Image: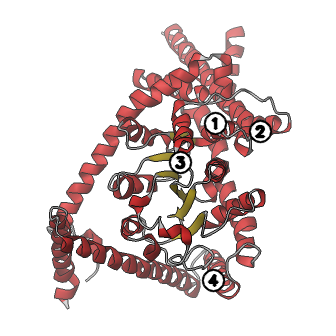
Amino acid sequence: MEAKQHATFVELFLKLDRRIIYTLVVLAVAVPLLIPIGLPINVTPEVQSIYDKIESLPEGSNILLAADFDPASQPELYPMLMAVMEHIVRKKHKLLIVVLWINGPNLVAQAIDELRKEYPDWKSGEDYAFLGFQVGGTIVIMSMGNDISKTFPKDHYGNATSPMPIIRNFNKLKDTDYMVMLEAGNSGDWWIVYGTEKFNIPVGAGVTAVIAPQYYPYLQAGQINGIIGGLRGAAEYEKLIGKPGKATSAMDSQSAVHALIFFAIILANIFAMILVVQKRRKAREAK
Amino acid sequence: MQFLKKKFPVLLAFVLGMVMFIREFVPAKIAQSLYEGFVNWSLVITGFAAVFAIISLLHYHVAKVRKKVPGYGFSVLTLVAYTQILLLGLVLGKDIGTPTAWQYQFVFVPMQATMFATLAFFIASAAFRAFRARTWEALALLVAGLIVMIGRVPIGEAILPKLGFLAEWIMNNPNMAASRGVTLGVALAQIAISVRIIFGIERTYMGGGD
């Protein structure tokens, strides 16, 4: 009788209503946001090397930033964009920003707007140029290899790019001293194949956690010098620039959700095994 | 007409494909200017392709509304949303503070973010139900997945400091090897498809019909 009750509990657990799981996910996200724990974040070598590269460049170096993402990846890549841009601004490097994803430019415009409030002397056309979106994907990259101002005759705000002071010394891909690409899809592959490899540009990749595994072969081959992976990577970069932001504050929530799924999978597997053993025992007893 | 529809695209693909391929091995200045010319053409053609895509989308939804097929209300919504954002963008611009930017920031961004965020719930539920160690291979995948999942967040390293190192090792070795295999496979397939297109064996890109 006792064994029967135990089996019922196992079965009940394995058929747990999805709404209970959803509620647990909501709690795991919301509670740490309301009551932060502040778990320590260790910086990985992949993130450190991107930071070190930007840090080591002489003032006024040309940096190309590709922000190829849209609002679906905003929670992971927007904090990364903010942290990397702020680092570049602080180091007084020249920055060109391009977008290959049609729904991305407004997010970059928003980030620039936010940053300009803090750094009012950071001037468009001189210190940075936001070139916006251009249709064409790989063709845009190939065209930037020939002439950036011809590929983007106007910036995101409608200003002509050719008279801009920044464009004078930064008008071809080969003028790039370092590139950071923030990628939510396969456009990172395009940059490596048609841009950075062809013109021998050192590049670091900031990517969503989902596609981070795809970038490790590039890292090992030396085709990229680092990976900022997902929200965790963004939090690491925020730690490096000494300015905890959205990524850092969301790390506790991410920890809680990961822990929840971790224990849910382990418990589900243990209970599934118990169920198999019970079924086998019953089958033996029936014989 | 058959020549223009069937043979000309194949001929064009062959000539341009071969020219661009041979050009890579010619270090002359003319080869570079030829490349620049082709890239400029491609940019223009891609721009036109984007316009065609918009026309095709509108045509599809207008046809659905005209025929009043089930669910045509969604097509009406698409057409209204498309037309108003286009007109507002053209008349008032897209800078911060304009209705276009407002719609992007307060309608589009939350909607897309919400769509993506719901994945967390489905993943949690699906992982609980389906991620089972039924075979040895599944067990290996399960263990690696669990280590990476918990080792890449601060709580994992807080519980066991070595977990972070272990997760990094998995990403840098077994994961890297598998990803490289996939990347090489895709690259080889791309080469094969390119050769088939250049030599007119692969013609699906021309579409069906007469």
| Same chain for the residues under marks 4 and 1 in the image | no
| Residue B187, position as x, y percentages in the image | 28, 50
**Please, which colouring scheme is shown?**
secondary structure
What crowding class fits label 2: few (fewer than 14 Cα within 10 Å), some (14-19), or many (20 or more)? few
Q: Which amino acid is tagged 3?
A: Pro
Q: How far apart in space, not on screen, are marks 3 and 1 (Cα)?
A: 23 Å
Direction from residue A28 to residue A102 in the image, left or right: left
State which tag comes first along the sequence, 3 or 2. Answer: 2
- Of badges 3 and 1, nearer the viewer stands 3
Residue that label 3 marks: A58
Residue that label 2 marks: A23
- Residue A254 quadrant: top right
Q: Disc 2 sits on a residue from what chain?
A: A
Q: Quadrant of the image for the N terminus of chain B?
A: bottom left
Nearer to us in this view, B97 or A55? A55
Q: How far apart in space, not on screen, are marks 2 and 1 (Cα)?
A: 29 Å
Q: Disc 4 sits on a residue from what chain?
A: B
Q: How far apart in space, not on screen, are marks 4 and 2 (Cα)?
A: 40 Å
Nearer to us in this view, A4 or A266? A266
Q: Disc 3 sits on a residue from what chain?
A: A
Q: Is B184 above or below relative to B131? A: below
State which tag comes first along the sequence, 2 or 1. Answer: 2
Q: Is A86 above or below relative to A11? A: below
State which tag comes first along the sequence, 3 or 1. Answer: 3
Q: Which mark is residue A236?
A: 1
